[in-house]
Amino acid sequence: MSSHCRNDPVLSNALRARAVAIATVFALLCSCQREDREYASAPTSNAQPPRQSTLQPGATAANPADPVGQHYQDNAFHIDEGSRLYRAYNCSGCHANGGGGIGPALMDADWRYGGRIDQIHATILEGRPNGMPSFRGKLTDAQAWQLAAYVRAMSGNVRNDAEPSRREGMAATPPLDRLPKQPPRNGDPSAGTVPPP
Amino acid sequence: MMRTSPLRWLLPAVAMLAAGGCNRVQSVLLSSGDQASAAGGIWNLMLWVCVPIYVFVLIALALAMRRRPTPAGTTRDRAIGRGLAAWLALVGALLTVLVTASFLVDRRINRVAVAPLQIRVTAHQWWWDIQYLDPDVSKRFSTANELHLPVDRDTRIELASADVIHSFWVPSLSGKLDLIPGRTNAMTLTPRRVGWYRGQCAEFCGLQHAHMALDVRVDNAAGFAAWRAQQLAAPQLPLSGAALAGEHLFESSACAMCHAVAGTIAGGHGGPDLTHLASRRMLAAGTWPMDRDHLDRWIADPQKPKPGALMPAVPLDPRDRAAIDDYLMGLR
Amino acid sequence: MNTPIDDIETGQAQARREALERTWADRPGFIGWLTTVDHKRIAHRYVATALVFFMIGGALALLMRIQLAKPENSFMGPDRYNQLFSMHGSAMMFLFAVPVMEAVAVFVVPLMVGARNIAFPRLNAFSYWVYLFGGVMIFTAFFLDVGPEAGWTAYVPLSSSDFSPGKRTDFWAQMITFTEVAALCIAVEIVATVMAMRAPGMTLARIPLFAWSMFVTSLMVIFAMPAVMLASTFLIADRLVGTHFYNAGEGGDALLWQHLFWFFGHPEVYIIFLPALGMISEIVQTFSRRPVFGYTAMVLALMATGFLAFGLWVHHMFATGLPPLGNSFYTAASMMIAIPSGAQIFCWIATIWTGRKALVAGRIATPMLFVLGFFALFVLGGLTGVMLASVPLDQQVHDSYFVVAHFHYVLIGGAVFPLMGALHYWFPKMSGRQLSERLGRWQFWLFFIGFNVTFFPMHILGLMGMPRRVYTYPSGLGWELPNLIASIGSWIVGLSVLLFAINVIRTLCRPRSAPDNPWGAPDLLWSVSSPPPAYNFEEVPVVGGREPLWPADRPLQVMTGLSHVRREALLTTTMDAIPATRWALPDPGIWPLWSAIALTVLFIWSIFNPWGVVLGAIPFAVAATIWFWPKRSQPSLGGANERDC
């Protein structure tokens, strides 16, 4: 009879309560930001735009990464919004679906102006020689970060659980999460820059 | 419980009719169009069939609970068996009536429209793009979130979606029909009463499903023609210096990336067409009334009234924003 | 005075009971808790788990009603609200309604048909673990802000990776897979138990109505669940590996999801509702002290409902623009369901009408009270269902609050009220203690009143044009008052459920005192002690009629021959329940648990990486292989020397 007691609902409730407690601890440990839909509260960068040239007298100054970028590049919602903006603002007009056309390809490992998210962000907002226009004023800072996060993800540089999969509509390329991951190559990985071919 | 239950049904029913009487703008029961009236007829028929059945069942149950026990015997059970057969025959007959009525009304609603006005509605997250079609290309125009219909005339509305599934529902005029990506649906509206009506997206479509309303103006033939002529005309040019500055700001900033104003270089198609923005009654798909104060607050931060909307808060200093307000308020 | 022979017989009976006790005992301690295959213990935890999910789901609903209490409320934002209502619907449908009905059946059906355990007991244990892990997974995800956000119906493309980024919908889709696996396992067990393990003499025409209803329900589960598993697997494939099943741009179709989902989703409603019909039949019969009128009609009505349920899924899609003539067919089919339902309502009322009302302490017993509540609510919900079957009317009120009111009347009135009645009714057998009638009555009245206050105004809101699934609404449309009333009512319902929880916990803290048959019920379940021993029946009962325990003084005949030292069950023929063979039932084992854990790893892994399906299958295959490894003999725990009787 005493063994029968153990399967009383009350006691299994207690066990479940323990399970819930464990789950809560797990939640606190994770403090998951990747799914947050930050439609109104996304951080923006107050810092000056990063230097676009390393030319300077004396030793090369460090070009520190903007911490805001990390926030955007790990968030599934922001990457997805970036994907929407990429289509809405006709980035495909020059870069196609990442394969490149008038502009360089975005789904390979080569980055002329740096493959870090804050460098891509700067490229979008400030423009680059030979055709990339400046979108400063046309995009809000958050939108530029979202686009940058998506552009970075186009070559697979994104954490697995935030990676976008296939889009609705006609597909010119396989979904991003089916493409091989291509970390920025050639040169300083922190800057991720390569000289133009 | 047996005694109070019919009361519980009747009292709110009365309250319901009273409440429904207050509001013609968005109501299933107070219909203002042929299609909604047809559905309303079915509603009345259903109510007349269903309420007596409900009351009958509860009374039977109450009597059954109050009855003194009687010895169950086979003869008794046989009599009840006949009762069961009669009951099922009654239910079957009533259902046949309802199915037939429903079928006939459905046919009436789906009749082919006669020389209809043609409109194409494309739903976006979370607003309505409305195009008035015409064989003559110069007579076509686009607007957003406000549908104008002539009274006593068939209008055929093509329904399409740009992103997810939405549903077009103006209860006072007609039942709803979904807008599904990859498909085009069509419905006919025949409004019978001049006035303002309100429609709302009725298929869950994401964060701002709640703020995806549609203003519908039913007008007499002359009023509709005047409105149409106004929509076809280019908006008046900015008159004041501030408005001119506003136009320049609008075209050179983030606004023009998504919005179009006919006759200017602003040609974005991500958001609603603003050509005659100031002539509309509501702002942001029925979220706020259209006036300068609300427009200013909307541009300052669209995420406050409509969190999740795809329009970002563009950082503008208040003077620039005022100039843009001036410009937009002139778009009539 | 006992004669010496009596003493010897008593002594033998005592020895027999002790042998059975040893044979069917679980291992001691926590290991015993993990390895048990006793259908009663598993049913206990199944019911308890489902009720916990019910309360969490209800708490989510209360939060939603706070948000909707006034227009443009800022209690929560749209993202939180969307997750709440998606989670509320998913938890209530997948983690509460279907599992709790099956859980009750896992306890009741074997006892009702006179079996020593449910068929496939280890599958039963496996089913529970899979269900538990799936439920814990989705709630953990929810608390981590990875809860579903596209509604419990998860229509594509809103649930596609384009509009639902991240892993929220993947967790939802895998939760479906978990619960479907669990439900299918139980469905198979119940079909086998009802078809093959009935007591001798329990012909098809003598099966208790609850067992019939669970049999039909289980067949429906077997036919309906594969559709949703297919649908959710397509969704996962679309999201995970970029297939285009639902992508119109690449030749897929967004409506395919709705067809597949509702081909499951409509039968799902009846999967929840049919067990409730069986519960009502049992309660009505017991408290009217006469067999249910029209047994054959009742069974045919159950089967007709189960059959028709598969032919009317399109009435959830009347607004999608399908061809009108096709829609009319589904109108007719949907309305036809009113005929079997009407027949059952009639039969129950006739039973009450001609029966002798059995009262408890001069009042209507709580189970019967809930059944009366069922009539008042379900008939109303059924009639609004008839209204919704009409295409023109449905196009008006579809996806409005009218529908919200309708399905809550049908699901709460038609399933939760009978379930509450059944829990009160079977609680003495499940726990050996009787719930307080006083608290039960309070619970009933609060529930009944609170329910109507909450959901009746929603009919009006729907007719006034308020769509469902909105996180807020504007003022000035007359929606304020009905919403406020509904919000107040929801808290009355919450209070009622709290009373139920208090009643259960308080009762469980008391000593066991329930008699074997407290309500004077007629079926085999009530012939054993409360709670039943691990082996259920000392000897196999033999049944000579539909109500074996009526009249009460009739002794129950038994058949001997099953071993007392091995776990054996008697298999009987399907039609006439003639004893056919003895079947060795398995001992407790840990491998169902390990298999469930391996399956959980597979499912969760596959959310993040498609290779999880391939590599995760290996541990599952290992665990399942050990589970099913043929054993030369099945020595039971207590069995020293086999002694055939």
Image (cartoon, rainbow, N blue to C red):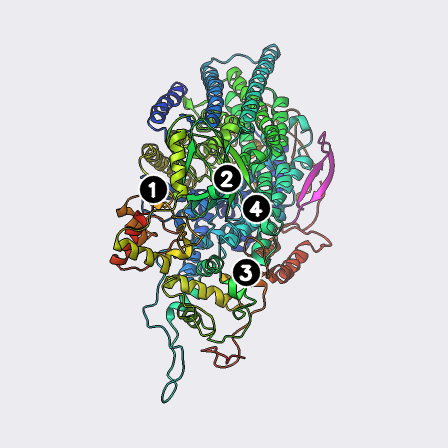
Q: Are marks 1 and 2 in contact (CB under 8 Å)?
A: no
Quote the CA–CA distance across marks 1 and 2.
Answer: 22 Å
Quote the CA–CA distance across marks 4 and 3.
Answer: 29 Å
The residue labelled by disc 4 is: B182
Q: Is residue A142 visible?
A: yes
- Residue type for callout 4: Gly
Quote the CA–CA distance across marks 3 and 1.
Answer: 50 Å
Q: Secondary structure at mark 1?
A: helix
Question: What chain is tagged by disc 3?
Answer: C
Image disc number at residue C608: 3
Co-location on one chain, circles 4 and 3: no
Residues drawn in magenta:
C566-586
Front-most of residues C70 and B99: B99
Question: What chain is tagged by disc 4?
Answer: B
| Closer to the eye: label 1 or 4 | 1
The residue labelled by disc 2 is: B134
Quote the CA–CA distance across marks 3 and 2.
Answer: 50 Å
Crowding at label 2, few (<14), some or many (≥20) Cα neighbours within 10 Å?
few
Q: Secondary structure at mark 3?
A: helix
Question: Is residue C580 rendered magenta in the image?
Answer: yes
| Closer to the eye: label 3 or 1 | 1
Query: Residue at coordinates 62% horizontally, 31% vertically from top-left?
Result: C326
Query: Residue at coordinates 34% horizontally, 29% vertically from top-left?
Result: B23
| Outermost residue toward the bottom in this view | A58
Q: Secondary structure at mark 2?
A: loop
Front-most of residues B199 and C461: B199
Q: Whole-percent x and y of residue C108?
A: 57, 36
